[in-house]
Structures are given as structure tokens and as C-alpha cells.
Image (cartoon, rainbow, N blue to C red):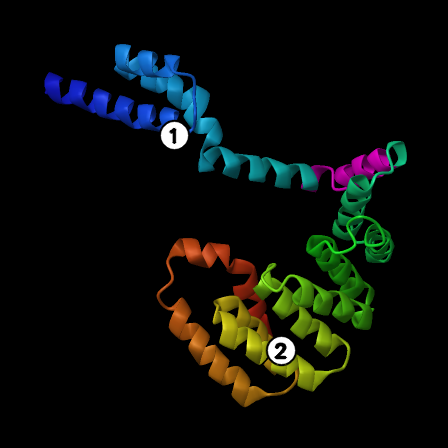
Amino acid sequence: MPFFGLGLHFLVAIYFAVHAVRTGQQTYWLFILFSFPLLGSVVYFVSIYLPASRLERGTKRVLSAAVKVLDPTRELREATAAFDYTPTAQNQIRLAQALLNAGDAKQAAINYEACLKGPFAADPEIRLGAARAFVECGNFAQAVTHLRAVQASHPDFRAEQVALLLARTLQGAGDTVGAKAAFEQAVARFGSFEARAEYAIWAIETGEQQLAQALKTEIERVTRHWNRHNRELNAPMLKRLALAFKQ
């Protein structure tokens, strides 16, 4: 048993040594890990491995969400102050995003449009943000213009997200035929749960019950094999689907 424990310590040390080499850590970590296999591994785990791990990133996301709940206007205040102090394009982009997240879509759209007149005129991220802001404002025609521009200049940029937003935006603009065609193209191209779910919700809202039921059957066939993790990741969409089919 002592030999087994010692061997396990060395295996753990080797694992962390490989991690150290691959991530470009200082070479003294190798000396620590193999000179003190147990203690060295513990120190390496706490000092190097954990901060870079998914657990650490997950913790940061939780803390970030908590900050937003406790102080929801913090990012908007800081973005406004940064832009007032240094009115650069980067700070204006940050301000536009903060305004959109805070629910001031009209002002966000104005700031996004200003950004698109400068050196970032063709930036797909800014165009997508502008489209989202115009959708929130109810200015669907302008949103469609931005989304079409993204697809034309950067066809691979967040392709599914852009395609689905375009389909919903066309519906908002009153182009039901165009929206249906956009949804069909998205499902054919991506075949994802999200694409089918958004199409199903649209079908229910537009009264195409037969189409909605057919999509529901496809969705249930896919989600039947999901594990708990997949269900948690897609919980918001699953909730939207359930509410839509209760109508």
C-alpha cells in the first residue's frame, strides 16, 4: 500500500508537470513537483492549476452574475465615466453594450451607429450589437439592414445567431414569408436544437400548428437523450418552448 500511495503521488506530479510544460510555467515548478510530489502537487494545484481551471472560470461567472444583481447599473456607470473621460471608439462600444444590457436600447442604437461611422465601420460585432439594439427599439427595418450586411461581409461570423435573429427580425418587420424562409434555411444549415426551437415558437405564434407539432416531435426526439448538463444549458429555451406550446 505505501508503494501504491507513493506511485499515485508521482502520477499526480507528472500530470501537473505536463500541465506546467504545456502552459509555459517556470521550470522551478518541475523541481518542486518531483522533489516534493505530494506537497508540490498541492501547491501547484492551488497556485497555478485552479486559477486556470473551469471551476475558477465558473466561480468568476457566478460572482459576476451576483454583482449584476446587487448593483445592476455598475457597468453602465463605469462605461459612461470611461467614455466621458476618454471618448474613444472602444469606450463608446463598451457604453453601447452597457446601455443595451441596461434596457436603454434607443440610446444604445445611437452609440452603435456612431461607432459604425468610424474605423470600426465594417466590424461585425458592432453591427450585430446595433441590430440587437434596433430590434429592441422596434426598428426592424434598420436591424435587417445590419444583419444582411453582416451576412454579406462576414458570412461565418456567428452564423447561426445572426441567421436566427434575422428570421425573428423579418417577422417583426411584417415579412412572414421572408421569416419562414430564413428559419427554414437556418434549420437546414445548422440543424441545431436552438434553430428548431425558435422555428417552432415562430410557427405557434403565426398559427402554423401542423408545422409546430412536426418540429416539436423532432425536438423531443433529440432532447430525449439529453443528460442533466444539456438540460441545464438549454433551460431558458426549454422554458420558452413549454410556454409557447401551452398557448
In the rendered image, residue 219, in percent from the top left (x then y), is placed at: 45, 73
| Disc number placed over residue 182 in the picture, else none | 2
Q: Is residue 183 above or below residue 92?
A: below
Q: Residue placed farthest to the right in the image?
A: 84
Q: Nearer the viewer, residue 238 or 119?
A: 119
Q: Residue at x 68, y 71 (%)?
A: 166
Q: Is residue 245 visible?
A: no
Q: Residue at x 32, y 12 (%)?
A: 31
Q: Specify whether residue 4 is painted magenta.
A: no
Q: Nearer the viewer, mark 1 or mark 2?
A: 1
- Mark 1: secondary structure: helix
Marks 1 and 2, the one that precedes in the sequence: 1
Q: Residue at x 71, y 59 (%)?
A: 128
State whether the magenta stretch is mostly helix, strand or loop: helix
* 25 horizontally vs 165: left or right: left
| Disc number placed over residue 22 in the picture, else none | 1
Start-end of magenta stretch? 69-83
Mark 2 residue type: Ala
Which quadrant: the N terminus?
A: top left
Q: Specify whether residue 78 is painted magenta.
A: yes
